[in-house]
Image (spheres, rainbow, N blue to C red):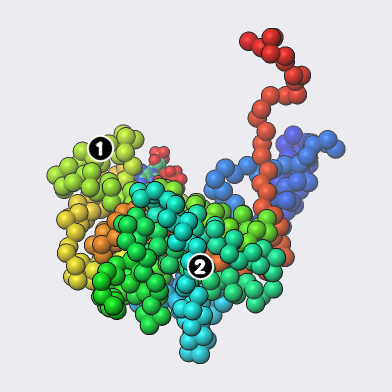
Amino acid sequence: MADTLTVTDNRTGKTYEVPITDGAIRALDLRQVRTGPDDFGLLAYDPAFMNTASTRSAITFIDGDRGVLWYRGYPIEQLAERSTYLEVAYLLIHGELPTEKALADWTWQVTHHTWVHENVKKFMDGFHHDAHPMSMLISAVAALSTFYPDARVNRDAGHRALQVHRLIAKMPTLTAFAYRHTLGRPCVYPDNDLSYAGNFLNMVFRTADAKYAPPPALERALDVLFILHADHEQNCSTNAMRSVASSGVDPYSAVAAAAAALYGPLHGGANEAVLKMLRSIGSPARIPDFIRQVKTGEARLMGFGHRVYKNYDPRARIIKGVADAVFAATQPSPLLPVALELERIALQDDYFVTRKLYPNVDFYSGLIYDAMGFPVEMFPALFAIPRTAGWLAQWLEMLGDPEQKIARPRQVYTGPDRRDFVPMERRA
Ligand code: ACO
C-alpha cells in the first residue's frame, strides 16, 4: 500500500500521484494540477484554516475527539497536579523538563527580569482611567520593543533567550501596572522573594502592607490556571504570533499582535463574556429561556464549544477542581449555581449534544478569577500572561524550522475583471 494520494483532474483527464506524509499532503503538490500553461495551478481553499496544517510542531498535542492535551508529551493532568508554571514554561521553551539546577537558573533569570523601565509608568499614566487593562497590556508589550531595540537585530540563541526571559518576566508586571492604573493606585514593584504567581498577586493586590503574603490556595490555583493556559498549539493568537514574527519583527511586537488576537471574545475574551452572560442570566430559573435564545441564534452559550475539542476540554475538568479549592478559601460565587445548572442542562440538550458542544477552559475560569477578586476586564490579561511562554516556544520553533518563510496565504480573487478608470462625471 503506497502512502500516496491519486488525484484525477476531470477537466483534463490527467492523473497525479501526491505523497502523503504524517497524514498530510503538501498543498504545493496541488500546483502541478493545471489545465494548461497559463493556469496558475490548483489552490487549496481553506477559509479560517479549518483543515490546513501551517507547521510541523513538537510542542503541544491535542486530540480533540478524545479530549487529550499534552505539552511536549506530558499529559496536562500530570503537569497541573505535579508541576509549577515556571517549570512548564521551561518545558515548553526547551522541550524537556528541567533538572534541579536548570530550574533554579531559569527561575532566577525570570525573577530578575521582572522590573520594567520607569518610563513604562509614564505612558501608562497617559491612558484613560477606564482604559481596558488588555488594551494597555497590548500597547505596553509593543512598547517594550522601544526599550530593547537590540531585539530587532540580534538573532543568536543567547539574545533570543534574553528576550524570552524578559517577556515571561515582564508580562505580569505590565498587567499589574495596567490594573493599578485603572484603580488609580500606585504601582507595586515585583517582590523577588515570591513565586511567579505569588508575586503577581502581590503586584495586583498589595495595599499598605510592607510585605505581601499571597494566600496559598489562591497562589496555587493561579499557578495551575497558568499551567492550563500555557499553550494550545496553532490557535488564533499563536497563529498571529507565528504569522507576524515570520516577517522577522522583534518578539515584543509579535507578542503584542498575539495578545491582540487573544483579546477577541471568541478567543481569550471568552471568560469575560462567560461571566457577563452568567450575570445577565442571573438565576437558574432563567436558564431555560436563555437556552431557547441560544437555539434560535439570538444568544451564544459562551464558554461552550471549541474548534478542536469535540469532547470535554480536559482543562475544564481540572478547572472544576481548582474552583472548589478557591471557593473553599473565598466566598462561593453566587453565579456558581447558575453555571452548574447551565452546564447540566446544556450537556443533556440535543442542540449541544449533536453539535458536540462541551464546556471549554473558559466556562469556569472566569468564576475563579472573580472569586479571587479580579474584575472581568482583567481576564484576557490573565490568559495572556501564561500564554506568553507558549507563544515564545512557537516563535523559537518557527525560527529554527528551515521550511518556514514569511507567512503569506493565497486568495481566490472574486472581484471585477480588468476595467478602465471612469471619470467622475460619468459615474452613476
Ligand atoms: N453556543 C451556541 N451554539 C454554538 C456555540 C456556542 N457556544 N458554539 C458553536 N455553536 C454552534 C454553531 O452555531 C454551529 O451551529 P450550526 O451548525 O447550526 O450552524 C455549530 O455549533 C458549529 O459551530 P462553529 O461556529 O462552526 O464552530 P467553530 O469551530 O467555528 O467555533 C468557537 C468555535 C468559536 C469556540 C465557538 O464554539 C464559540 O463561539 N464558542 C463560544 C465562545 C467561546 O467559548 N470561546 C472560547 C474558546 S476556547 C479559547 O479560546 C480558550
From the viewer's side, name the closer residue of 117 and 349.
117
* 203 relative to 19 in the view: left or right: left
For the question of whether residue 302 can be seen, the reply is yes
Q: Look at 54% across and 48% down and name the residue there.
A: 50
Query: Where does the N terminus fall, quadrant-wise?
Result: bottom right
Q: Look at 37% across and 65% down and name the residue there.
A: 187
Q: Is residue 32 above or below residue 91?
A: above
Query: Where does the C terminus fall, quadrant-wise?
Result: top right
On the image, the x and y values in percent for residue 193 come to 38, 83
Q: Look at 63% across and 72% down and name the residue there.
A: 160
On the image, the x and y values in percent for residue 312 come to 35, 59
Query: Quick one: label 1, few (<14), some, or many (20+) residues within 10 Å?
Result: few
Q: Disc 2 designates what residue? A: 117
- Per the image, label 1 sits on a secondary structure element best described as helix
Q: Which disc, if any, is residue 425?
A: none
What amino acid does circle 1 point to? Arg
Q: Disc 1 designates what residue? A: 292
From the viewer's side, name the closer residue of 397 and 306.
397
